[in-house]
Image (tube, rainbow, N blue to C red):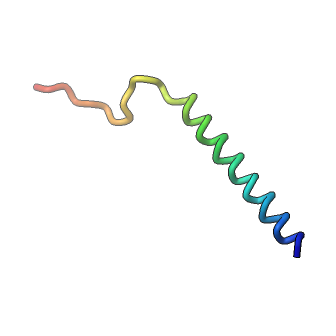
Amino acid sequence: MQWLFTSLLVAASAGIAVYTGYLLRRLFTTAPGQPDVPVDPAP
């Protein structure tokens, strides 16, 4: 039974690590000060 909880703990830790890496990559790959949607100039 403890193998089940150990595997769940390892899976949760791996998921947290992958998600943290994703957030860090998203943080450092976006250009600062530029909106995601281009703003059309007013006529």
In the picture, residue 4 is in which quadrant? bottom right
User: Is 18 left or right of 32, judged from the image as shown?
Assistant: right
Quarter occupied by the C terminus: top left
**Can you say whether 42 is above or below 12 in the image?**
above
Q: Residue at x 85, y 64 (%)?
A: 6
- Above or below residue 3? Residue 18 is above
Say whether residue 33 is left or right of residue 20. Answer: left
Residue 15, horizontal then vertical, whole percent? 70, 54
Between 23 and 37, the one nearer to me in the picture: 23
Q: Residue furthest left?
A: 43
Q: Nearer the viewer, residue 22 or 4?
A: 4
Residue 3 in the image: state x and y as whole percent.
89, 69
In the rendered image, the vertical position of residue 6 relative to residue 21, given as above or below? below
What is the x, y in percent for residue 20? 65, 43
Name the residue: 66% across, 40% down.
Answer: 21
Residue at 40% of width from left, 23% of height from top? 33
- Is 22 located above or below residue 13 in the figure? above
- Image coordinates of residue 31 in percent, x first then y, are 47, 25
Q: Residue at x 78, y 65 (%)?
A: 8
Residue 32 is left or right of residue 1, and the answer is left
Looking at the image, residue 11 sits to the left or right of residue 39; the answer is right
